[in-house]
Amino acid sequence: MDKSDGRYVITDLPRVGKGVLAADNFTHGELIMRERPLLVFPQRTYSTMGGASFWDVVASEMPESLRKSYRELYNCRRPNLTDFEGIAMTNALRAGRITGEDESYGVVGAQSSRFNHSCTPNAHFSWNPNTFASEVRANRPIKKGEEVTIAYTNIYQPYDERQRSLKTSWRFSCACVVCSQPGSREYSDKRRPFIDTVRMFKLQDRLMNNWLADASQPRDAMVRLGLLYAAAAEHEKVVSPDVWLLLCRLLVKAYCAVNDAEGARMWAQRAAAHTVAFMGSHGGWLAVARAPERTEWWGLRAKRCHL
Ligand SMILES: [Zn+2]
């Protein structure tokens, strides 16, 4: 089992059961853990089959060498669900679509399933289809001794919805640094759903295309929107790389569209850092940072507005 050079430890933590502690400092985007899963299963099967037969098959087919590690994981659905199904429900991480298959898969790992949840997680889980392995990377710099956390649910929901989702699926009430600050909840509950709108692709495309083609809108309208997203995300200490990547992309495009190389460069560099945290590579963003004027977005507003 890849223990990432002993750079983390799985240990008992106060109030939350087992969790993962950083045993070293990690830089933004750095790989904390990579491991092959104990179990990969189609998430639709258990929700539509419901019966025990699927899990009986899983239980009987699992090699003895993996069974011990699997059985050591927590079943929060006891006694309603048998251990095999309950452990899968408690510990599965979303792998999304696996090569060639149209449905979403869940993966259970001996170590990757040990991360606890936070509404401001410092790490990000992703599935690497090339290595058929779970990967957890740092969302931001992590110091030795810090607990490493990931998000189990959509952290952009307001407090009540997050708590409901965590309670329903994982049977616990979140007491992370965000949830334990009732004083700032009112604003947080407005900011988080706002940040989430950056993931509404159709809305974002429409806003961008309208602005590009409409000379009556302020020249910096999309830059301002992007900066508003960034300020809200920073305020909420939300660092999930998928959302940051989208808002960095919006800002790079908006700056490029009005020929602002400096702004485009800065946000392309940030996009590169978040892409590393998301998928382990820069995804071409460093090339954009070096020469934003070579992108197809450069000067786009003048072109579309026929200025
Ligand atoms: Zn929380």
Image (spheres, helix red, strand yellow):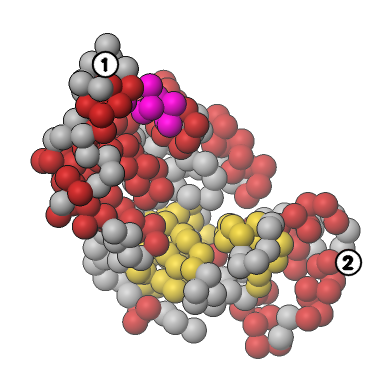
Q: Is mark 1 within 8 Å of ligand 1?
A: no
Magenta span has 78?
Answer: no
Mark 1: amino acid: Ala
Q: Nearer the viewer, residue 146 or 157?
A: 157
* Residue 135 location (% of width, % of height): 45, 68
The magenta segment is 204-212
Query: Image check: 296 left or right of 55?
Result: left
Crowd tier of the residue under label 2, counting other residues whose Cα lies within 10 Å: few below 14, some 14–19, many 20 or above: few
- The residue that mark 2 highlights is 53
On residue 215, which mark appears? 1
- State the predominant SS element of the stretch in magenta: helix
Q: Residue reaching furthest top?
A: 216
- Name the N-terminal-most of marks 1 and 2: 2
Mark 2: amino acid: Ser
Tell me what residue is drawn at x 28 percent, y 50 percent: 271
**Label 1: which secondary element:** loop
